[in-house]
Amino acid sequence: MRKLQTDYLDLVLLHQPFSDAYGAYHALEDLYEEGKLRAIGISNFYVDRMVDFAAFNRVKPMVNQVETHIFNQQKALKEWADKYGIQLEAWAPFGEGREGTFDNPVIAQIAEKYKKTPAQVMLRWHIQRGIVVIPKSTHIERMEENFNVFDFTLSDEDMQTIAELDKAQSSFFSHQDPKMVEWFVNIVEERKKNQDSSKEKKNW
């Protein structure tokens, strides 16, 4: 926080449900209770782990940031998040364009109907579902486009049509895949080696 020159942070998320996730979350709870964090949450927690953390911790997660887009809509997770008062936040709200999200004919047809872009339709769809979206772009014109989604409302029929696009599977990877867990372990080990190497160079 000294480096950020602030006394508190608005939100900190526990990024992965691996290793000592409970211990790490308890540390976030301590910082929250000290007033150094205004909100705490989790990321990439599937429905079983989310309910677990909501039920067995002092402070219920306030946010769960997960892969959510038209092809992986997280319907069951959304229902349980609503039950426990946990706000869903979408990372990759466009699915990073995988599987043709921007070129999908259903989305394109709805976009034409509202005189909007496919990206705007997908953002509006998230918002009407009550999901927080933080679309990433380095282009000013796209940033402006992403903000311009509050002057129209998708009809119930269009919302249902988009709901039917759901494949209920990740376009990236599964945190329940043991090979993916091993991949994360290797990343952590590599970072540890790099940190140790940096310390040795400083001491030298």
Image (cartoon, rainbow, N blue to C red):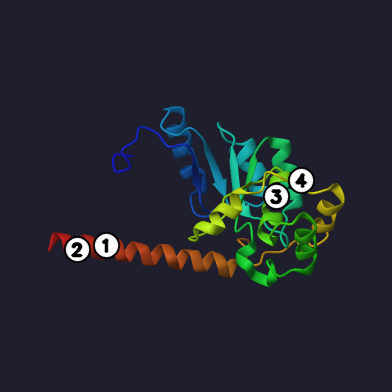
Q: Earlier in the sequence, mark 3 or mark 1?
A: 3
Mark 1 element type: helix
Instruction: Between label 4 and label 2, give the one nearer the viewer.
Output: 4
Cα separation, mark 3 vs mark 1, equals 46 Å
Mark number displayed over residue 153: 4
Disc 2 residue type? Glu
According to the image, label 1 marks what residue? Answer: 196
Q: The residue under label 4 is which amino acid type?
A: Thr
Q: Nearer the viewer, residue 172 or 182?
A: 172
Residue that mark 3 sits on = 124
Badge 1 crowding class, 10 Å Cα cut-off, few under 14, some 14 to 19, many 20 or more, is: few
**Given the image, on which type of amino acid does mark 3 rest?**
Arg
Q: Earlier in the sequence, mark 1 or mark 4?
A: 4
Q: Residue 200 got which mark?
A: 2
In this view of the protein, which residue sits in the foreground, 189 or 61? 61
Report the residue that reaches farthest toward the front: 115
- Report the Cα–Cα distance between label 1 and label 4: 53 Å
- The residue depicted at 16 percent of the width and 60 percent of the height is 202
Name which residue type carries label 1. Answer: Asp
Asked if the residue under mark 1 is in contact with the one under mark 2, i.e. CB atoms within 8 Å, the reply is yes
Residue 17 point in image, percent of width and height: 55, 52
